[in-house]
Image (cartoon, grey):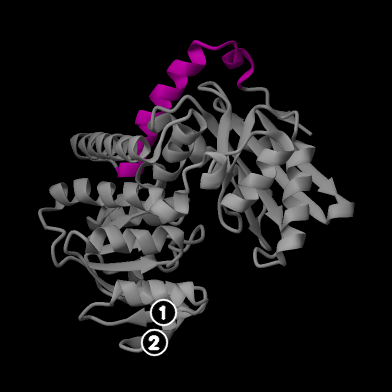
Amino acid sequence: MQDLFKYADEIGPAKIIHIYEPSADLKGILVVDNVAMGPSIGGVRIAMDVSLDECFRLARAMTFKNAAAGLSHGGGKMVIYGDPKMPKHQKQQIIRAAAASLRNEESYIFGPDMGTDEECMAWVKDENGRAIGLPRELGGIPLDEIGATAWGVYHAADIALRYLNFDLKDAKVVIQGFGSVGKHAARFLSGQGAKLIAANDSRGTIYNPEGLDISALFALKDEGKSVADYPDGKRLGLDKIIDIECDIWIPAARPDVINEDNVHRLKTRLIVQGANIPVTNGAEKQLFEKGVMCIPDFIANAGGVICGAEEYHGAMVTTALQTIEEKVRQNTEKVLEISQRQNIPPREAAMQMATDRLKKAMSLRRWSLFSSAPHFN
């Protein structure tokens, strides 16, 4: 029990709940980190190597993300142990069991993440009524279809470029992880004249210094193939994506892909974090010392949760996209202004901004009276 309290600080977590349902082969963890600003929102992640530590870090990132975005929601996260590519009937059984197990846990609203999608959220909605990222037929805004998270990543990059004195036109872009976030980030950036020179997915890396045809990459993914199957480029190993020199490097996959052991290999001017916790704190500090700008995850990739919150409160697609653009641009601008004025890394500036907002909310809520006393099940 004592080890569980290693996560406790003045912000949270409010609850850590372990879920086990043997009849559904369900093993999962829910971390509700902080609810001072409202019920927590956070995605459900399915992977073979998830852990309590990862779940807590992701939940905390959601706390800061939602606070920085000025949403009336706290941060939470759920992880489920399993193969994200399991058969559909098995996934439905597990997701429904998780949603049913947490039917009365009103402090948490389910959202999509790695290994889950809008259909999974429809199953959650059917079981307990609390989900965002729903199918259009259920009144949802299809986050992946419109590229909500990537829309924010694009706007964060656009603001950052003003501080780096180079234009998006002809900027060389590398995207690590060509999934729902990565592919739409490529689409939005290329639409403004940037050049995608390398991308990868779980099966390999493709590189062409003259640029990649994004529509062809989309077609490959739609066919269930890898970007590495793209014919007009050099196929490289998965990890080689780190070594490709570029202007903008976008991590859009797993946590900790850039760490103290490999950060020296990056050759870029700007990193915009499309994934959650893709760069370790130590690596970010090294990047700052080298003069590489790194826009933190909970600022750059907040588009998805902003869209989800808008959906939850009844907004339509146009309003959601406008809100993402406004909030991400304003927050990126403020973070970089603080960073430059105080000569601190952008993450430190972002945490300062988000923590100030969070603590103000905590001071106004009775919840703050027991914020340092987490509850574990």
Dot placed on the residue nearer the N-terminal end, 2 or 1? 1
The residue shown at (37%, 47%) is 296
Q: Is residue 136 above or below residue 368?
A: below
Residue 301, horizontal then vertical, whole percent: 39, 47
Quadrant (top left, top right, bottom left, bottom right) of the C terminus: top right
The residue shown at (20%, 65%) is 194
Q: Is residue 94 above or below residue 7?
A: below
Residue 359, horizontal then vertical, whole percent: 46, 20
Instruction: Tell me if label 2 and label 1 are in contact, CB under 8 Å.
Output: yes
Quick check: is 67 in the magenta stretch? no
Displayed quadrant of residue 356: top left
The crowding category of the residue bearing disc 2, from other C-alpha atoms within 10 Å (few below 14, some 14 to 19, many at least 20), is some
* Residue found farthest to the right: 23
Q: Magenta part mainly helix, strand or loop?
A: helix
Q: Which residues are magenta?
A: 345-371
Q: Which residue is mark 1?
A: 205
Q: Is residue 298 left or right of residue 24?
A: left
Q: Is residue 36 left or right of residue 154?
A: right
Residue 307, horizontal then vertical, whole percent: 43, 39
**Residue 235: numbered disc:** 2
